[in-house]
Amino acid sequence: MLVERYRPILYLQYFLLLVDLILNSFIEMLRFENVILLVLFVIQDLCIIIAVIVVFLLFFNTYMFQAGLVNILINKFRLAIGVTFVYFGLNVGLHVWEMTLRWDEPNAYIWETPGFIALYVIQRTGAVLYYYFYKRTALKLGDPRFYQDSEWIHKEFERRR
């Protein structure tokens, strides 16, 4: 029952990752107009924000959260949450810098700025980490153990005390 209820949410999370992946891969081809590029950057950033909101809504639905064991839940997903926020910051930084470089001339060659190239490479590397950790988190949150009282939760609570 729980798995069937969780399936549409998982598909939504996969869709948000796919949109981010497609935009990361092909956004350079659509740079002929500043407004289009800006709208695509905003869509990409909104997808990340929506993805974070979905994960936190799933957190709120877990038995652990409702039982007041939030610290166990946060500790279990700390790395994924951190990677997501770092990736979002890298994304926004790259988008702002790229729009600054391209605003007057959308088809300008901007790949001669060493700092921009470094940020681009770091952001793309962060994207791979984000995809991995977000997908792993989405799949883990589909586990029925998080949504019911179990011996596993009691062991985690005792271990963390």
Image (tube, rainbow, N blue to C red):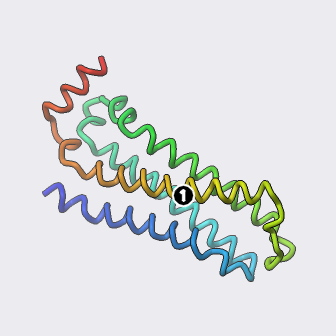
In percent of width and height, residue 92 lies at 66, 56
In percent of width and height, residue 115 lies at 78, 54
Report crowding for label 1: few under 14, some 14 to 19, many 20 or more residues within 10 A (C-alpha).
Answer: many
The residue that disc 1 covers is 127
Q: Quadrant of residue 69?
A: top left
152 w.r.t. 136: above or below: above
Question: SS at mark 1?
Answer: helix
Q: Quadrant of residue 150?
A: top left
Residue at image point 43% right, 37% down: 78
In percent of width and height, residue 94 lies at 69, 58
Residue at image point 39% right, 50% down: 55
Residue at image point 75% right, 76% down: 34
| Residue farthest top in this picture | 161
Residue at image point 30% right, 17% down: 161
72 w.r.t. 93: above or below: above
51 w.r.t. 72: above or below: below
In percent of width and height, residue 100 lies at 81, 63
16 w.r.t. 155: above or below: below
